[in-house]
Amino acid sequence: MAALPPFVDTRIDALDEIYDRLQATLDTNKTLDIAYRNYNLKQLYFLLTDNEERIQASLKADLDKAGFDANVGDIWPVINQIALAIKRLPQWMKPESASKDASTMFKLMRPRVVKQPKGVSLIISAWNYPWQLALGPLVGAIAAGCPAVIKMSEHSPASAALMEELIPRYLDPEAYAVVNGGVAQTTILLQKQWGHIMYTGSGMVGKIVASAAAKTLTPTTLELGGKSPVIVAPDADVKIGARRILSMKSLNLGQVCVAPDYILVAKERVDDFVKAIVETMDEFFPRGSERSFVKDGAYACIRNERDYERIVSLVDDQDAKGQLVYRAEADEKRRRIGINVVHLPKDGAGEQGLLVTDEIFGPILPIMAVDVCSVEAAIKYVNARPHPLALYVLSKNRSYFDKVIHETLSGSAIWNDVAFTPVATTLPFGGVGDSGWGNYHGVHGFNTFSHHKAILEVPYWLELAQKSRYPPNLDASARK
Ligand code: NAD
């Protein structure tokens, strides 16, 4: 296996040249051709399959991710997106007739919608799934015919450097480019006019991106985070619920935008639920064994020391308050921590700590008893907070779930499971309000990077039906 390349910041004075090159490519109209788009989508597929081992190595270097976590989180979801795009591209690109509900007059004008590339686009991605969060949007951009710059996160340098090596080797270098670096590079890129900007990351930087884009009136998609709750109804199967929650919370050590952030449990089930979670932790990750969380090579590590310290101090704080019900193993040297379980006071009393106000983005699971026997109480709790990226409901009762999803606003929702929506290839993936705006994946990614142009044809023979529009036939009373 070839060694991984070193991470090097893209020179600031190279950014204009990159932008101009991609703009010139757009002007040639070659990206309009379906064969060109298909070729680059296929090449992207080969980029992933030919280099699977090196991509895994880059994820190991960045986040200590092992093969399983790397494949499930970074490689397979993109391959599925590519396969869907290649299969459906002819259909997505086809003009859509808008005749069906048009009046007779407009029917005669053959109303239709034509999809065009919005233009050279900017994809700013985050470190936690560096390959998926850069290439997932790129699939939409290529499918829509947009040249694109990928700005990788400086917090996943091995992935960023490998991406910079591979993209020009596999895709048309005149149309697709990688920029590496941090705030300095991104700030310059954001001053340019783009066809579309897709940003993934924190809400704080999302506001910087949106403000910069407003100055050039560039449309944006913001894929942000937030606190995604799990509501556990009185009738929930807590054993299955605990298994499903912990299997997904373990992925990437909870550093996942749709990871379950906190659990609201019906008061009368909270002890059962805590017991199920603790038993499942012991079953999945028996302490001291090869499968223990810190020894198991299947999971990632915390991205850096600062985040490791942040998680440990949250756990210590909960311990001091007597609210920690499961203290997980930790390995400071490898920055690996198991899932710590916190039982918060009833009805969120004393809930002003960071654990309740901020996105956790790590392996801590706070469980809070609320009066969710009344589904209204759960809905009220969620609606009093920013709209989550995802919302999960555990209940045997389908109508409980239906009521929650109809009366709350979240990017996505799942009945009896968690965190799956980003890999459900055909669903739109995105948030609402504080968790972001816009979406992508499948046809939604294609649409995000496409302009939908309204087309009418008005043949000369329609003059017969146009008499009333010409003066002096206007109603005399209207002229007064
Ligand atoms: P990050 O630190 O990698 O930052 C994201 C991008 O923003 C990077 O490319 C970075 O270079 C750039 N950036 C940082 N500061 C900037 C500035 N001042 N100006 C311009 N650009 C700047 O990622 P992060 O923000 O730590 O990511 C974690 C957050 O992202 C969490 O809130 C998580 O929930 C969210 N997230 C959302 C999704 C999603 O798809 N909705 C996916 C992953 C992560």
Image (cartoon, helix red, strand yellow):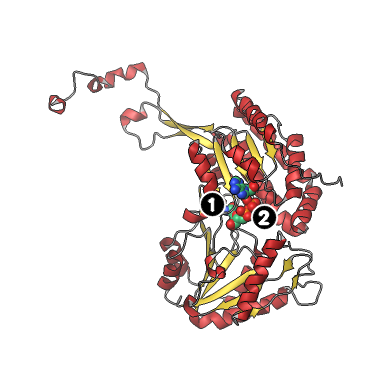
Tell which of 305 and 444 is nearer to you: 305
Q: Percent from the top left, x then y, of residue 193?
A: 54, 33
Tell which of 324 and 130 is nearer to you: 324
Residue displayed at 38% across by 36% down: 100
What amino acid type should be assigned to the residue bearing mark 2? Answer: Asn
Q: Percent from the top left, x then y, of residue 346?
A: 49, 80
- Where 424 falls versus 150 (above or below)? below
Q: Quadrant of the C terminus?
A: top left
- Where 316 falls versus 155 (above or below)? below
Q: CA distance from mark 1 to mark 2?
A: 16 Å
Residue displayed at 69% across by 75% down: 281
Q: Percent from the top left, x then y, of residue 459?
A: 37, 19
Is residue 80 visible in the rendered structure shown here?
no
Residue displayed at 80% across by 52% down: 57
Earlier in the chain: of badge 1 and badge 2, it is 2
Asked if residue 298 lies left or right of residue 275, the reply is: right
Q: Which residue is mark 2?
A: 128
Asked if residue 149 lies left or right of residue 103, the reply is: right
- Where 169 falls versus 463 (above or below)? below
Tell which of 232 and 433 is nearer to you: 433
What amino acid type should be assigned to the residue bearing mark 1? Answer: Gly
Q: Is mark 1 within 8 Å of ligand 1?
A: yes
- Badge 1, how many Cα within 10 Å: few under 14, some, many 20+? many
Tell which of 352 and 56 is nearer to you: 352
Q: Is mark 2 within 8 Å of ligand 1?
A: yes
Q: Which mark is residue 430?
A: 1
Q: Quadrant of residue 51?
A: top right
- Badge 2, how many Cα within 10 Å: few under 14, some, many 20+? many
Is residue 184 visible in the rendered structure shown here?
yes
Q: Percent from the top left, x then y, of residue 212?
A: 52, 41
